[in-house]
Amino acid sequence: MESRKDDLVADLRAQAQQYENLSETVSTTTNSKQRVDNDGVVYEFDEEKRAWFPKIDDDFIAAYQYHYGTNTNQQEPTTGVITAANMAPPTAEAAKPIVNASNAIPKQKQKGEESKDRKSQPEGWFDVDETKNTNVYVSGLPMDTTEEEFVELMSKCGIIMQDDDTKEFKVKLYRDTDGQLKGDGRCCYLKVESVDLALQILDGSLFKDSTINVERAMFTLKGRYDPSLRKKKKNTKKRKRKTQEKLLSWNESKSEKRSKLDKVLIVKNIFHPDEFEKDPTYITELKSSVKEECEAKFGPIKKIIIFDRHPEGVISITFANPEDRDKCLEVMHGRYFAKRKLHAEKWDGFTNYQIEETDMEREERIKKWEAYIEEDNA
């Protein structure tokens, strides 16, 4: 019991001695009290909050920035006093974006420097990346190969790219200085995968009794680079993307791809102009007969025009759908109508089959019509 009492007295004396040591370091000022901790940090006592806070001075700010870094995204304070509340040590999550922000600066600089270096590169020849090269070189072609045959051959492995302006396929058959074919050519596909397919299928195959060789096109740099011969780039990325999507799409929206001209059919030698002079009502009978037969066999018709004065006996039939026009073209061309062999073709969109009559022809037609009416009334 006595030992416990002695221990309690010893603890009380130690606490009293510690309080005396602490009170020696406290200096009373007009606004606050200060004390120095064992690690050297100076604390101030806030009378309002009744708590001790680290004293904010130049030494403390320097130590804070040394341990936690600086936030480059913060704006510099204009006026005001830094308090202990806003200088509290940041949490782990608060410190994380500060570190990321400081690390992002060199990356942005590096990206800007790369683009600057790319722009500063001099214009000249460049190598084509193999993963983006869609060209194949074909050798061993027969000397009588036409461009249409070459396109048909290369189309077996994929879609061939077309020129944006001329819409021509990007293929080339090489010729010598005399203009004669050399037996080799180049084809540019739309996709890189078509190149691999051409290497597998066409390389070593027979084409018109000739064995052809297919390989990736390797472009040889010849002569000095002339920037004036370089084609000007056009901002057609969006249009190219849409064209490629249509070519690669499985959806066949025929109504979108085909124009109004694909609905018009021209039929020739279906009548002779003299037949209308003999019987003016025959033009109505012919129109009704053609419309009835075409709608029954092929599809709805929007308009029929009979060019009654044309010497070739021409009529135009406008269908509601291009597919119906195609079926009518297959059936009508070469068939016989009223002992006449018909000639059917697509309208080119330009030819005008209307023939204007002269004043004398008009007067003569009116006289014949009046005579026909009088004869019918009699």
Image (spheres, rainbow, N blue to C red):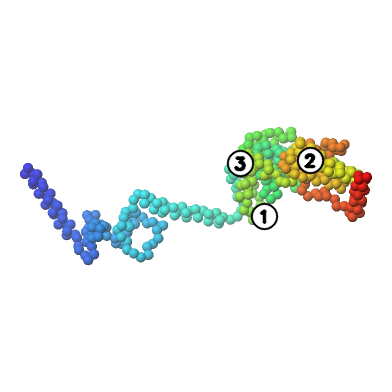
Observer-nearest of 216 and 196: 196
State the residue at coordinates (68%, 39%).
155
Residue on which disc 3 sits: 192
- In the depicted structure, whether residue 300 falls above or below residue 71: above
Q: Is residue 146 visible?
A: no
Observer-nearest of 331 and 188: 331
Residue on which disc 2 sits: 291
State the residue at coordinates (8%, 47%).
6
Foreground mark, 2 or 1, reads: 2
Crowding at dot 1, Cα within 10 Å, few <14 / some 14-19 / many 20+, comes out as few
Residue 348 at x, y percent in the picture: 77, 47
Residue 177 at x, y percent in the picture: 75, 47
As helix, strand or loop, the secondary structure at mark 3 comes to helix
First-in-chain label (3 vs 1): 3
Figure quadrant of the C terminus: top right
Q: Disc 2 to disc 3, how far (Cα)?
A: 50 Å
As helix, strand or loop, the secondary structure at mark 2 comes to helix
Say whether residue 356 is left or right of residue 154.
right
Q: Residue 229 got which mark? A: 1
Q: Residue furthest left?
A: 2
